[in-house]
Image: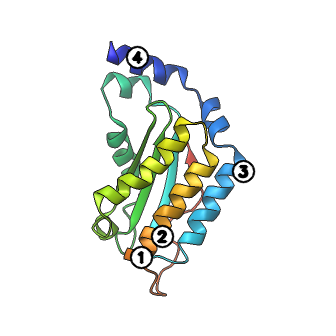
Amino acid sequence: MKMLSRLWQHLSTTSAAGRRAFPPATLKAIDQTIADGETRHRAEVRVIVEPALSLQAVLQHMSSRERARELFAHYRIWDTEENCGVLVYVNLADHKVEIVADRGVGRAISAAEWQAVCRTMTHGFAHGVFHDSVVAALDQLNRLLQDRYPDDGSRTNELANKPVVL
């Protein structure tokens, strides 16, 4: 029964739901928050929003975590000079937020701190507050990165700041 429920959730969550939750103003705010944060730390942050998984992925029991890792590789977020890529992946149908961090930056922040950033988003999303929740979570992430992975003046922007909505 759980599989049928998940399947229905993914089939009924359309790209229109993604556009409603993340309209142009929210995408612009995400881009700006990432850009602002990257002036204070050495990490490279990307946000990818996916309304739903494909039918095949759901039938193969792909988790949001597995999908996030797949997108981390596909978008080459790992391909930075300091191994400092951070993916924030939002799956609307599963109501999940996953963070995948490359080894350079991943060691700097504890699992509990990564999870707290995810909770900031999921808590707000559960109340239909997407814009403010994602900006607050990215601000929280930027503060953590600034404290643990501060800018040393040597970084260049290696990954686009513009969020991706699949």
Of mark 3 and mark 1, the one earlier in the sequence is: 3
Tell me residue 158's x, y (percent): 49, 70
- Cα separation, mark 3 vs mark 1, equals 28 Å
Residue tagged 1? 147
Q: Is residue 82 visible?
A: yes
Horizontal and vertical percent position of residue 3: 34, 18
Q: Residues within 10 Å of mark 3 (few under 14, many from 20)?
A: few
Distance between the Cα atoms at labels 4 and 1? 41 Å
Look at the numbered discs 4 and 3 and tell me whether their residues touch, using CB distance below 8 Å. Answer: no
The answer to which of marks 2 and 3 sits earlier in the sequence is 3
How many residues crowd mark 4 within 10 Å: few (<14), some (14–19), many (20+)? few
* Residue topped by disc 4: 5
Q: Quadrant of residue 136?
A: bottom right
Under mark 2, the amino acid is: Arg
Q: Amino acid at mark 4?
A: Ser
Answer with mark 4 or mark 1, whichever residue precedes in sequence: 4
In this orientation, which residue lies closer to the viewer: 27 or 70?
27
Q: Is tag 4's residue or tag 3's residue first in the polypeptide sequence?
A: 4
Dividing the image into 4 quarters, which one contains the C terminus? top right
Pick whichever of labels 2 and 4 is earlier in the sequence.
4
2 vs 4, front mark: 2
| Callout 1 secondary element | helix
Q: Element type at marker 3?
A: helix
Residue beneath disc 3: 25
Under mark 3, the amino acid is Ala
Q: Residue at x 45, y 75 (%)?
A: 146
Which SS class for mark 4? Answer: helix
The residue carrying pointer 2 sits among few (fewer than 14), some (14 to 19) or many (20 or more) residues within 10 Å by Cα, namely some
Provide residue 157's location: percent of width, then percent of height: 53, 73
